[in-house]
């Protein structure tokens, strides 16, 4: 049995590095959390997606119990450990700071809608983005929903879609959405009928009104991009070996050494003292 030991996951790149290790496993694998000191709850969406991906290739995956109390508590509160091992019990999230780990089958619209309602009416409004007007909040929620719609429509993901999130005391709300489908590069290349690199494909998808679908205007990320730039938040997209980001108001992209079999969208909202509303709204 192969063993992948996980220590700290505080960034998307670190989470991807562990996925790259898991990708080398061809038989059974043990995900060793015994020495894990800190794991951001939202990145369990990525770990969970990769567990499904490995199991779809008939690779057996086992998970050890974290020894650090903070890691064990976090992963039980967000339902990651109980989801994959019935030996772990789910803990109540008394502080209401996690968006629990969830897996959605492509056809399970009822569960998807339940998540949308929770995200919009609960976490974002009452515990998260309190510095947004109702109209901005509605548009941001619609954009996130459109991310799911995009995955449903053409990701071709047999494993489904995955999400998780966390609200931090430092006025930060992180949400990670993953699908294990064909990736943005495949869809954009097919739509444009020409070869395009993975990072160029993501950049194309980020432009307003660009879409590989006929019924929508973009991948549902344009307003998110604008809001994150204004608030100095973070947006990261990985698809295949393409990496696109907005950090500290700067936009960039590059090619990675590791090819991720699907798409990851990682969104970090900053909750500052300013109030944001759409142009044309009456104050």
Image (cartoon, helix red, strand yellow):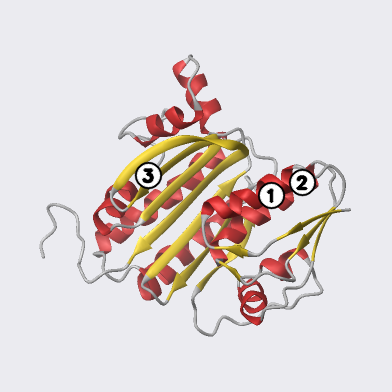
- Image coordinates of residue 243 in percent, x first then y, are 48, 39
Q: Earlier in the sequence, mark 2 or mark 3?
A: 2
Residue visible at 45% across and 62% down in the picture: 174
Residue visible at 63% across and 42% down in the picture: 180
Secondary structure beneath dot 2 equals helix
Check if mark 2's residue and mark 1's residue have beta carbons within 8 Å.
yes
Q: Residue furthest top?
A: 194
Q: Which residue is mark 2?
A: 54
163, 112: nearer the viewer: 163
Q: Which residue is mark 3?
A: 221
- Image coordinates of residue 31 in percent, x first then y, are 76, 60
Q: Nearer the viewer, mark 3 or mark 1?
A: 1
Secondary structure beneath dot 1 equals helix
Residue 261 can be seen, yes or no: yes
61, 2: nearer the viewer: 2
Q: Residue furthest bottom?
A: 94
Q: Which residue is mark 1?
A: 50
Q: Is residue 35 shown left or right of residue 225?
A: right
Residue 133 tag number:
none
Residue visible at 46% across and 32% down in the picture: 199
Q: Residues within 10 Å of mark 1 (few under 14, many from 20)?
A: many
- Image coordinates of residue 145 in percent, x first then y, are 45, 51
Q: Is residue 159 shown left or right of residue 217?
A: right
| Residues at marks 2 and 3, CA–CA distance in whole angstroms | 29 Å
């Amino acid at each position: 049995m192969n063993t992948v030991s996980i220590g700290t996951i505080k960034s998307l790149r670190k989470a991807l590095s562990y996925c790259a290790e898991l990708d080398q496993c061809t038989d059974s694998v043990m995900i060793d959390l015994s020495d894990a000191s800190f794991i951001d709850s939202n990145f369990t969406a990525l770990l969970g997606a990769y567990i499904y991906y490995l199991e779809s290739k008939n690779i057996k995956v086992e998970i050890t119990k974290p020894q650090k109390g903070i890691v064990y508590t976090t992963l039980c509160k967000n339902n990651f450990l109980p989801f994959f091992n019935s030996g772990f019990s789910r803990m109540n999230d008394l502080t209401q700071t996690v968006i629990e780990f969830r897996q959605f089958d492509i056809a399970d619209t009822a569960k998807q809608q339940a998540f949308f309602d929770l995200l919009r009416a609960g976490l974002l409004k009452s515990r998260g983005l309190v510095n947004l007007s109702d109209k901005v909040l509605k548009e941001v929620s619609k954009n996130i929903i459109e991310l799911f719609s995009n995955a449903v429509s053409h990701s071709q993901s047999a494993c489904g879609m995955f999400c998780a999130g966390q609200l931090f005391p430092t006025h930060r709300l992180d949400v990670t959405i993953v699908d294990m489908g064909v990736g943005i590069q495949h869809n954009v290349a097919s739509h444009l009928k020409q070869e395009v690199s993975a990072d160029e494909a993501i950049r194309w998808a980020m432009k307003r009104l660009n879409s590989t679908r006929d019924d929508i205007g973009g991948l549902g990320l344009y307003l998110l991009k604008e809001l994150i730039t204004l608030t100095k938040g973070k947006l990261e997209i990985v698809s295949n070996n393409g990496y696109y980001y907005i950090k500290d108001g700067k936009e960039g992209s590059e090619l990675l050494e590791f090819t991720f079999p699907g798409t990851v969208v990682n969104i970090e909202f900053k909750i500052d003292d300013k109030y944001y509303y759409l142009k044309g709204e009456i104050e």
